[in-house]
Image (cartoon, rainbow, N blue to C red):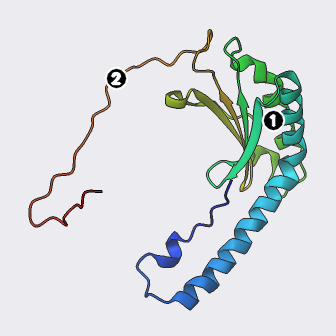
Amino acid sequence: MSIEVDTFNLTYKKPFNGDLFLAEAAKKMNETLSEVREVFRLYEGVAQRIIRERNAIHAGSADWGYYGWSGLMISVHLRKDEGFDVAHDYYEYLSFQTRSARADTRVKDRNCDPEAHDYALIMRRAFTFQIGKAKCTLCLFADTESDICKKVEIGTEPTYELVCSGSPIPVRAA
């Protein structure tokens, strides 16, 4: 697991200055760690409960990570005879925590009942709960051999090749 510190705006179209970059990156790191602390303050307890309960049912079927785009990510890997409905309680735990947690964000501005976002290619359904900048994403991964969930191809994916004229940089055979 890694925590990403977004330094894009520190470098894009700015003069090259290593010392300035490192000073600004240190500020960004402190901001990022502050955000991570807030996520753990709000969601650590309920995440531990979900992982503990799921792993008690099926050892090794739940884990976690932290990513900038999803915040705290709780991953539940379903067995081939399970559908997304087995995670109903986990959704409810996170919804209740998001609604009830002490934070500066008003309840009406929180995402307590997020909609599902499906990523069919990897057979994942995700729900992102949010309080201010603090995010917790519940990811449910259906088994590729699932009796209940199927990945269905609905179109064709174009492929591309880069072709350039001029003098290419030679490619050396390995």
- Residue 112 visible in the snapshot: no
Q: Residue at x 41, y 19 (%)?
A: 153
Q: Earlier in the sequence, mark 2 or mark 1?
A: 1
Q: Residue furthest front?
A: 174
Where residue 170 appears, as percent x and y from the top left, is 19, 64
- Is 83 above or below relative to 37? above
Q: Quadrant of residue 28?
A: bottom right
* Amino acid type of the residue that numbered disc 1 sits on in the rendered structure: Ser
- Residue 81 visible in the snapshot: yes
Which structural element holds mark 2?
Answer: loop
Q: Quick one: label 1, few (<14), some, or many (20+) residues within 10 Å?
A: some
Q: Residue at x 82, y 42 (%)?
A: 98
**Residue indicated by mark 1:** 95
90 vs 159, nearest the viewer = 159
Determine which of the numbered discs, if any, sits on residue 155 in the image: 2
Which structural element holds mark 1?
Answer: helix
Where residue 165 appears, as percent x and y from the top left, is 9, 60
Q: Residue at x 72, y 47 (%)?
A: 65
* Amino acid type of the residue that numbered disc 2 sits on in the rendered structure: Gly
Report the Cα–Cα distance between label 2 and label 1: 35 Å
Determine which of the numbered discs, if any, sits on residue 34 in the image: none
Where residue 11 appears, as percent x and y from the top left, is 48, 77
- Is 130 above or below relative to 82? below
132 vs 45, nearest the viewer = 45
- Is 29 above or below relative to 109? below
